Amino acid sequence: MSRQAWRDFICAPDRAGRHLSAIGRGVSGSVSDAIDHAALTSFLEKLHDSAEDTRLLGTVIDLIAGGYSRFASDALPRILDALSNEMLAQEQIVGPGLRGNPLWDRTILRRISGTLSPVHYVSRTAHRSFELPENQLLSWLVEDLHNCVATVEKRVGTHALHPDLLRVGNACSEAQNHHWFGDVSRPRAVTPQMLAAAAHHRRPEYRNAAKLAQRRIEMETRDHHAWWYALLSLLAVNWLEPVSDDDLFELFVLVLTLDIVMHEAGFGEPVEYGLVTARRGPVAIFEKGDRRVRVFFDQSPAAVLGVLSAYAQVYREHQGISGSSRRPDILIAIEEGSVTRLVLVEVKKTADGRYISDSVYKVFGYLYDFRAAASSVGIKAVLAVPEGVAGLATAASSRTLFVTSANDRGAFADDLMAAMSL
């Protein structure tokens, strides 16, 4: 199977697993075949923090796929240096030098009344104003984008913020400090007059701003039905595609794992999903009778399940070295009554025999690291590579480590369920 084959599986219209891609730096905005409406709706409604997670997902995909980064990098700096303005007449006190058009009658009356000194004048002067509707729309858009990026940053962390979002946030901060743009008021809402002024402006940068502002208005409307329609339209075809082949293969194995638990293991649809963000919980939870399966992605057993880590213990017992618990790519916790079994899935996109051998040794490290859990909860591991590996006909129940080819669904499903003791 190639990258395209992995992508096709992830983006199959009957599932929304593509949206379990990490919300971070290593993705790009991408478009694929539309997800079935029912599958997408079910996924969004089962998100752990349904309202917040749905809005976060929509915001990130819109900011990355909607052309805001290009606008912030190119169009915004250009328009700030050519900001629309008009000259307005303003009555003011000038002096001791005379400027503008002096109003002699008012000057004389105020001097007689003692409210104006002999060296000052009442004059009508020209004043440059940037308080135009197209600039107010631009101000609203810049403020809105700045706030959106700040909200995403709180959820994913600064170090994981996508470069496009970082670019948008920085550009908006610089714009707000611009010597001309800073004088423009920031409206609480966009009016039809603002949209019309920008949409019909002679400069293309304003017309672009109008389109982006309209898009953000649709994504933030308080009309639930209109917002839901806009969100579904966005998420049905747009997604965050991993840039590297390694990350795409990891996502493929994650989606494949969930699919196997659903179908081959017979658990059916998850009862809950979770986005891949900072401080996240499981990406999926399955329930069947008294059995519960929780699937974690890129999470340490020590962090999410409280399992002791021998690796971390070494650092706690010494000075001069530091570290934290290692994280397998996928962690599966199978809970049945008071019994818990753990399966660690390590994913390596390689066909190199030596690298696979090294990876086996790494997985042994995981099993040793969490050996304290083995005696009480039971722990096994699966090493998934694309192809070229097949297990011999030995008793699967006696194996602790399974090395399998993820491109062979049947073999991968057999090994995964054997490791899960299903």
Image: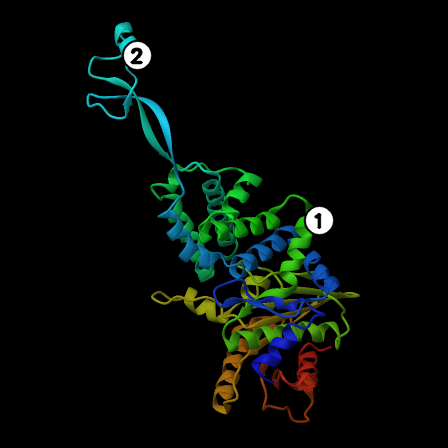
Q: Residues within 10 Å of mark 1 (few under 14, many from 20)?
A: few
Q: Earlier in the sequence, mark 1 or mark 2?
A: 2
Q: Quadrant of residue 185?
A: top left
The image shows residue 2 at horizontal and vertical percentages of 58, 83
Q: Quadrant of residue 323?
A: bottom left
* Circle number at residue 361: none
- Is 76 situated left or right of 234 in this image? left
The image shows residue 386 at horizontal and vertical percentages of 58, 84
Q: Residues within 10 Å of mark 2 (few under 14, many from 20)?
A: few
Q: 155 and 234: which one is in front?
A: 234
**Quarter of the rendering occupied by the C terminus:** bottom right
Residue in the picture at 69% in, 47% down:
224
Residue in the picture at 46% in, 66% down:
324
Instruction: Pick out the residue farthest to the top.
Output: 113
Residue linked to disc 2:
105
- Assign a secondary structure to mark 2: helix
Residue linked to disc 1:
225
Q: Quadrant of residue 306?
A: bottom right
Kind of residue at disc 1: His
Kind of residue at disc 2: Asp
Instruction: Pick out the residue farthest to the bottom.
Output: 393
The image shows residue 300 at horizontal and vertical percentages of 54, 67
Is residue 51 shown above or below 387?
Answer: above
- Assign a secondary structure to mark 1: helix
The image shows residue 288 at horizontal and vertical percentages of 78, 67
Q: Nearer the viewer, mark 1 or mark 2?
A: 2
The total of numbered circles placed on residues is 2
Is residue 409 shown above or below 338?
Answer: below
Is residue 193 shown above or below 384?
Answer: above
